[in-house]
Image (cartoon, coloured by chain):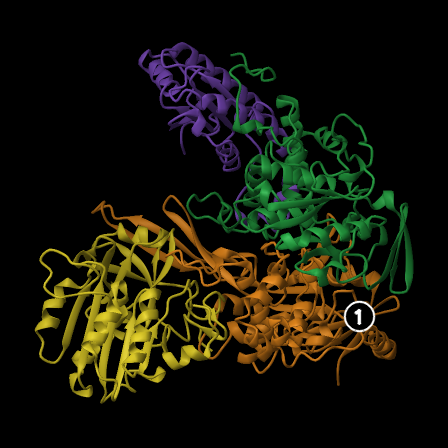
Chain colours: A orange, B green, C yellow, D purple
Amino acid sequence: MTLVKYLKSTDLKSWLAELAEKNSVFAPRYEGDSVIFAPFDPEQEIYTKSAATVPPKKTVFPQSEKLVDFTYHKDPENPGKTLIDGKEVLPQGTTVVFGGRPCDVRGFSMFDRVYLTKETTDIYYKARRDNTSFITIACEFTESTCFCHWVGSSPSDPIGSDVLAVPVKGGFLLTAVSARGETLLTSKLLLEGKPKVEEAEEVLDKVMENLGKAPDLSKSPGKLLEVFDNMEFWEKVSAKCISCGTCTYLCPTCYCFNITDEIQGLKGSRIRSWDNCMSALFTMEASGHNPRPTKAHRLKNRVGHKFSYYPDLHDGIISCYGCGRCIKSCPAGVDIREIVLKAIEFMPTVVEE
Amino acid sequence: MKFQEELKESIRKALPELDVVIGWCGSFDPLHATPHFIYGEEDIEKLEISPLNVHNLATYLPGMRGKKVGVVVKGCDSRSVVELLQEKLISRDDITIFGFPCTGVIDQSKVKKAIGYVGNVQSCDMSDESLVVVVDDKPHSLKLSEVLAEKCKSCRYPDAIISDYFVGDRIAKKDPAEPNYKELEKFEKLAVSERFGYWLKELDRCIRCYACRSACPLCVCRDHCIAESRDPHWLSQENNVRDKLMFQVIHAYHMAGRCTECGECQRACPVDIPILMLKQKMNKEVLDIFNYEAGVNLKDTPPLLSFKMEEENITEKDW
Amino acid sequence: MSTKNLYLPEIATIQEVIQETHNIVTFRVTLNNEEAMAKFKFEPGNVGQLSAFGIGESTFVINSPPTRMDYLQFSIMRSGEVTGKLHSLKAGDQIGVRAPLGNHFPYEDMKGKDIVFIGGGIGMAPLRTLLLFMLDNRDDYGKITLLYGARSPLDMAFNYELEDWLDRDDLDTHLTIDAEFDGWEHEVGLIPNVLLDIAPSSENSVAITCGPPIMIKFTLQALEKLGFKDEQIVTTLEKRMKCGVGICGRCNIGTSYVCKDGPVYTGAQLKKLPNEL
Amino acid sequence: MPVLEGKELRIVGFLCNWCSYGGADTAGVGRFNQPTDLRIIKVPCSGRIDPLFIVKALMNGADGVLVSGCHPRDCHYSEGNFYARRRLEIMQKFLPILGYEPGRFEYTWVSASEGQRWQQVVTEFTDQIHKLGPAPKIVGPEASDTLSLMQAALK
């Protein structure tokens, strides 16, 4: 029996305050004209109408985190000799993220297949992933840039979430979609949810209707490889790209990172930070050779990774859940949907004319 | 727009001699435009001139050296082209400039603010005075003046400063003698400590995507920016508001006497950080001290690339 | 799932530094943790990430063979920030080591076959580990031919063992340099040309080649002329790497991550990957 | 705990090799009394100073920055200080927008023979910084993202 509860909008802050007693709680709110996930602050309004400008990726995969602290020790007996010690710096504590969207949160299931495999476990990622719960809001409205239904997801996709919150009149219908989710729904502030189930289903049906028909992307892995060597194709689709990192940093499924050292005096840290395949430095080798020397090569890798390589490696799953941020926030209006469709429709003979 | 067809005609005429012409066309929804690369006859029809054409297309020029490129410019964009020419970063022989009288562009952040939530945009009808945006079957009527970009409200160069083709009637140059720095001056009235806190607060949400830099037409170092360089090591990769602010100062200073205030840095910012103000401050001081504006005269030398033995407007501290 | 920290290097001490050429040094290192050193296992072709703490990490092949475990040997060509720092270190200094990483040479499949090693410049390093491994298990393999080329004698690494290799009866060694040089007694000429002169038989053979991209390109053409099929050619690739465990996302060629699925590829495997070297 | 902790502020000085560093040396040899807050970094020429050095110093904990080079027309490299003057003047005017008080950064010219002028410049500048007190600081990366840092700065 699925646990369903009803939360009145007016009780939202009190409920998050309860959760904040034992966890760090993140919720979306306005900072300037953008909506970002910030530590819950009862003084500030929580924004729940639509997806945040920046997804809650940082709660599990921070923009920058320490991996190792190291120290050089001078040997007093032998000043020429220096000893080093390195210590791992593991994240602590539990976190609850309120207000992500299904496309935001499902993104982590994409991470899992890379960060938590049989051979390799990224313990930093695991420490956060295991200790972070997601109370996800199903989408009641869609945007021009939404395409979750193209890539096998939906506005109420529960994958990766612990609780799914469907907006209903006056509040949310909360459904536990994991065992951990059930433990989150024990508060006395929450009311019986069953009477609201029907209304919630109507909301979800309506939004699916709004999304319209999705094109078939099942051919994208093969088709993208077919156009791999057609640089004219890639130069054209990447012409307006300005090589910034907005698309990758706002992407809930982009998981690439850089590792760099910072040192002051004898102490320093090795840190991991978000990295961006649209930057030339991403693949630049020390010799000066760069396997992806132009933005056309780099955009090809970004699109190829999401719609070809990843699905080829991971049971056909496209590594994109259609949140549309890369389209909406792109300063130059690069539209990944358009590129994928162009590749799928691409007929080599047409171009050779 | 009235002269849109005329512009297409000019492009059609020039295109055989050019590798590409850069203009704008419709984008993912009726409320957005996107840069449009015209390679052949078949691409011309898509060209659209509208207040949605926010992008400064001069940004693409330094990366296309060696190619014959046509570029459609708003008045403010043309200043970037002039500045690039002043600094010899592009060659006049390689570019063909298409100008038109610009009546201003829309600031999407203002639209977002006015409508509240811009979801599924079904249509966007624009007239000279207003635009009607239909979102989820609900029409929102906005006055153009309410959503016009700040820079357009006090625009002094509505027509391209230089052009090879100019379509439409020139807008008689509006004449505020000086740029408008009212917002900046308001900010400067805050106490010093408040200003410091303001920047820390605003920049905390920076995601370090460097769209501000990549969208800037005068940021020509491109793949060799010191933001990512390890040697010299100006910035760390820590998620550190100090490094984020430092980068904005680096950008502003590297733009000193070069910035044409096209505002692309701020428009490109995915998290709406008001970074244009830093460049405006730099420009205001450049104007005060050197009586200089970037990108208005091909023959000018940017002030930090020259000097005078006696500087009229610099008063040094008397110890 | 493993609880091992993928990113925490073992601290190691440089036991010996050998200045190979003007821009290549060789480190012989042992892990400070004696138990870890005793238990350390790797296969020929595995790579390691060496840390100069405060500067960063860089990837190098372990070029000593698993049959000689007194130390782990790495050869480092100076080319960037990390290698620059590593070049300043001396015996007794400490570095970080994350190893073994990546795949290895398919030496099991090579048993009973004739082997042709073709190495150019620092590309000799990955070949060295397999060459010594095969010499230490000499009976498992047929005729072994080595062609090692460098720009000039001054650019030739592993000088201290070249004499031994030339003297051995069970190894056919050819050395070559690009242009005439006073006192040079071996071949002169570009590697692909010398390879065509030596003309090793492709019959029941495997060719293993590593070197700069331009050399690889022409060597592959020469091997094709000699009748080597894609399956008979093995090479190692180089990419910018960070994590070394297939996560950080920069070293992929299509679906293959060079740090984890490579760096060793057969010609046949490479042909299946997109063209992005 | 260092004896001067709390009494001293951190002032960074960028001095050109040919004039001002010599001037500071002259002041030292002449045993002119000077406050000790200043830490000197010698550069080849005031024209070598990227004004971003000044910002970097302030953001990394300096309370004041002083730049000194050869007098105009006396530059060892003829025109380095002419370029420097323009750049430094712009940066000086720019800094207040960030929240650094005017006066945190000054530039001046001191020749190798002007030991006394050096003493006066250092004394006056150190006074000026002490009057302003410690500069606003941005502390470690941990402080970011918790918002506490910002709130602290706003108080």
Question: Could you tell whether B53 is left or right of C146 in the image?
Answer: right
Disc 1 element: loop
Spot occupied by residue A179 in the image (x, y as percentages of width and height):
66, 78
Q: Residues within 10 Å of mark 1 (few under 14, many from 20)?
A: some
Check the image and report above or below for C94 versus A212: above
* Residue at the disc numbered 1: A190
Marks counted in the figure total 1
Q: Position of residue B70 (x, y in %)?
A: 66, 49
Q: Residue A127, image x and y in percent?
A: 53, 67
Looking at the rendered structure, the kind of residue marked 1 is Leu
Residue A61 in the image: above or below residue C262: above
Q: Where is residue A141 in the image (x, y as percent from the top left)?
A: 82, 67
Residue D10 lies left or right of residue B78; in this view the side is: left
Judging from the image, mark 1 belongs to the subunit labelled: A
User: Residue at (76%, 31%) from the top-left corner?
Assistant: B180
Q: Which of A302 and A350 is in front in this view?
A: A350
| Between A316 and A70, the one nearer to me in the picture | A316
Q: Can residue B311 be seen in this view?
A: yes
Q: In which quarter of the image is residue A59?
A: bottom right
Instruction: Describe residue B288's horizontal placement relative to residue A189 as left or right.
Output: left
**Residue A210 vertical position relative to residue A291 in the rendered view, above or below:** below
Q: Residue B169: name its quadrant.
A: top right
Q: Which of B299 and C132 is in front in this view?
A: B299
